[in-house]
Amino acid sequence: MKFTRFIFAISAMLLLAGSFTAPARADAVRVTVNGTLITDTQISLRAGLLRLEGRGSSNSARLQMASDELVEEALKLQEAERLKITVTDKQITEGYLGVARNLRVSVDKLNQILRASGVNVQTLKDRLKAGLAWQAITQTAVVPRVQISDLELDQKAAGALDDSSSYDYMLKEILFIIPKGSKTSASKRTAQANQYRKSFQGCDSAVDLSLSYTDAAVIDVGRRHATQLPDPIAKELAGLQNGGITKPRVSESGVSMLAVCSKSSARDLTFLKSELRQEQGTEKLQDEASDYLVRLKERAAITYR
């Protein structure tokens, strides 16, 4: 297993950003954050996790990164306590299990991977705890601050429309099924789909025509606006008239074509606005969360030794 996969899986978990572990034994204190002690041992353990993740160009760089992360996580856990947010052992256990699942290994195997690399298992669990705490803080204190202008969304959505995305369709899907375990090739089914396409004379006769083929199905897709469809399909449909049918495309289920049962001009911004709202909401939420953490740092009493 490559360690790069490990970092991607871990970094995807719950906006992970740091951890704090109480000192297991007396050792040199390097940083104090509002009275919370961060020791040499904690920094060294975190640097080991960073090394496993492939982060940091040198050991000294990793030690500095570890110190910075531990400071941030101490602030996050303190803020969670102030907001009366509690992270349970069950949540941490489930988060740790999620990391193992993303890596497609068992929890025992994940433990082995960490220990074989000299990484303390608890270090990762502490990081998960901080991530869970920060996620809860974000939902409680940051999300209410995120506001998105409908006017701005309308303007951006309108600007994103082009000729191919200004139509409303009633569609049927003609699917040449490739059963699981079948020896039938996609190329053979594509040839049959092309034969069907040459004989196609409109949606009214789509089912009757499909009866001439084995494992061919006609599915009512219903109304779809061009903005709901992948760009290549939307562009191809824009060039078809009522009764037209797209070229065959290989899908997970077999070979698929879309038939145009009706087509009309429609500048519908609903779906584009929904996508834009999600994208902008995510960006603004990240910006607000970053600003929130900056303010915590500015107000904190942080002493380096």
Image (tube, rainbow, N blue to C red):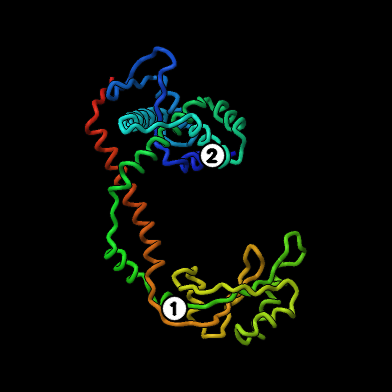
Q: Which residue is mark 2?
A: 98
Residue ID at (49%, 26%): 122
Residue closest to the eye, 144 or 41:
144
Q: Which amino acid does the dot numbered 2 rest on?
A: Gly
Q: Residue at x 33, y 48 (%)?
A: 285
Question: Residue sitting at 42 percent across and 81 percent down?
Answer: 265
Q: Is residue 124 left or right of residue 111?
A: left
The residue tagged with tag 1: helix, strand or loop?
strand
Task: Return the residue found at the far left.
Answer: 299
Task: State whether residue 182 appears in this view.
Answer: yes
Q: Quadrant of residue 77?
A: top left
Q: Residues within 10 Å of mark 1 (few under 14, many from 20)?
A: many
- Per the model, the C-alpha gap separating discs 2 and 1 is 42 Å
Q: Around disc 2, counting alpha carbons within 10 Å, would you say few (fewer than 14), some (14 to 19), or many (20 or more)?
A: some
x then y, percent, for residue 249: 61, 71
**Callout 2: SS:** helix
Instruction: Report the front residue among 182 and 92.
Output: 92
Three-letter code, disc 1: Tyr
- Above-or-below relation of 144 to 47: below
The answer to which quarter of the image holds residue 247 is bottom right
State the residue at coordinates (39%, 62%).
274
- Which residue bears the numbered disc 1? 167
Give the label on residue 276, or none.
none
Mark 2 and mark 1 lie on one chain; the one further toward the N terminus is: 2
**Vertical side of 179 occupied by 83: above or below:** above
